[in-house]
Image: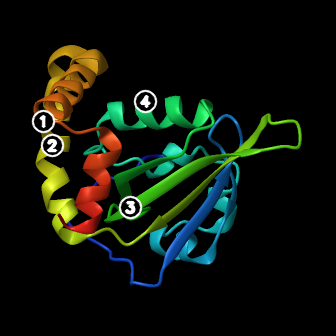
Amino acid sequence: MRRPEPTLNERFLSDGDYIVSKTDLHGHIIYCNKIFIKISGYSEKELIGSPHSILRHPDMPKIVFKLLWERIQNKEEIFAFVKNLCKDGSFYWVFANVTATLDGDGNIRDYHSVRRKPNRDGVKAIEPIYAKLLEEEKRGGIEASGAYLKNLLKSNGTTYDELVFSLQRGE
């Protein structure tokens, strides 16, 4: 499937909207709710079986997804601000929570994500950080982007989780 050309058209979630999806161990969508289908612009048939990265907006730094995969593969949850790309090139921001679903033996069965409306001030604060991470990524790859993020967090005396939660709370 051809990736859409990004536009400046932004879509917004309502306060009570929750986007829910599940992926298999390789990141292919195995479940998506109606809100996900509606906002993404894809049909359920187009989404099921597709890699979740079908929604990856080029403004998103790879280091965020590297951190996400590291966490969920270690059976840890993660929260993140994510800018997604719609089928028509529009975009929408979410505050995502991603976790691993475990079977009865404690093995990862699939991955579950719930996304909700992000704090708009948090989006405004994360955008320049993501832009700098992308700049570092273009300069020196994901390693440079990761080093920049690590140094940013250290210089602010915070952790990744503390940063995203404070932005979502509007602090």
> Mark 1 or 3, which is nearer the eye?
3
- The kind of secondary structure element at disc 1 is helix
Mark 4: few/some/many CA within 10 Å (<14, 14-19, 20+): few
Q: CA distance from mark 1 to mark 2?
A: 5 Å
Residue 146's mark? none
Give x and y (percent) for residue 42. Answer: 54, 65
| Dot 3 amino acid type | Phe
**Can residue 9 be seen by looking at this rendering?**
no
Q: Which residue is mark 4?
A: 66
Q: Is residue 120 above or below residue 69?
A: below
Helix, strand or loop at mark 3:
strand
Q: Which residue is mark 1?
A: 132
Chain-order first, disc 1 or disc 3:
3
- Residue at 54% in and 45% down: 77
Image location of residue 147, percent across then percent down = 22, 20
**Disc with the residue nearer the chain's start (1 vs 4):** 4
> Residue at 15% of width from left, 43% of height from top?
129
For the residues bearing labels 1 and 2, Cβ distance under 8 angstroms: yes
The answer to which of 25 and 49 lies nearer the viewer is 25
Q: Which residue is mark 3?
A: 95
105 vs 36, left or right, is right
Identify the amino acid type marked 4. Answer: Lys
The residue labelled by disc 2 is 129
